[in-house]
Amino acid sequence: MNIYQSLFTYFGPQNWWPADTKIEIIVGAILTQAVSWRNVEQAIANLKEQSCIDIKCLKNIEEKDIARLIKPAGYYNMKAKKIKAFIKFLTQNYNDDLQKMFTIEKAKLREELLSVYGVGPETADSIMLYAGEYPSFVVDSYSKRIFYRLGLVKEDIRYHDLKNMLENNLDSDVKIYNEYHALLVELGKNYCTKNEPDCKDCPLINNKIIRKMEC
């Protein structure tokens, strides 16, 4: 929590996830795989221009037409297939009703989401935290890198081990999980970068949260 408070004081609230609806969050979580958010924004803008960021349209539109619209997000054929797979899952299991889906118990829903083509742990947790408002911490490459450099985990820590470590040491609070993940991304993008980390100006070091980072 000291790390969280220091980052929150330095960066301020991040207001994640930037979206108008829950289905937009879910589509964004799929599109952001292996690509920057700027590219995702353009892909989502294309979907919105065609009034196709809702369940009905995504259910009826051809996969190839989704691929064409989301091209800026990269891997567009594969991601179109993933979007269609999620919509099929939602139709078959919850009759196109996201509100109903998000009444399912946390562990059960996460297991169901992980069974959907193209939904891995990070995407599943993003859907649950940001769209479903479940306390399910999202782990990504930024958080792995930061906590390794802080000396708190091994470099090759597995996704679920870091997720468990964080959830076991934080209150089960959706707001904190939301902000913490976003703040770690901000730190990773601006200071704790992969190749040339700026440890000298790191807000954690400057606020004496830690003595040294393994950069």
Image: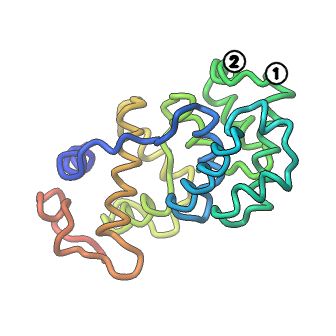
In the image, residue 52 above or below residue 152: above
Task: Give how far across and how far down residue 34 sits, in percent.
Answer: 60, 65
Going 23% across and 74% down the picture, which residue do you hit? 199
Amino acid residing under circle 2: Lys
Query: Circle 2: is it few (<14), some (14-19), or many (20+) Cα within 10 Å?
Result: few
Using residue 126 as the reference point, say whether residue 94 is left or right of it. right
Q: Is residue 149 left or right of residue 115?
A: left
Q: Position of residue 177 (x, y in %)?
A: 41, 38
At 33% from the left and 51% from the top, the residue drawn is 183
Image mark for residue 10? none
Q: Earlier in the sequence, mark 1 or mark 2?
A: 1
Query: What separation in Å lies between label 1 and label 2 (alpha carbons)?
Result: 9 Å
Q: Is residue 126 above or below residue 153?
A: above
Relative to 170, residue 209 above or below: below
Q: Amino acid at mark 1?
A: Asn
| Residue at 20% from the left image edge and 70% from the top image edge | 212
Residue 14 picture location, percent across and down: 33, 45
- Quarter of the picture containing the N terminus is top left
Provide the residue designation for mark 2: 100
Q: Which residue is mark 1?
A: 95
Q: Is residue 86 left or right of residue 207?
A: right
* Residue that extends furthest to the bottom in the rendered view of this protein: 196
Indicate the quadrant containing the C terminus: top left, top right, bottom left or bottom right.
bottom left
Picture coordinates of residue 132, whole percent (x, y): 57, 29
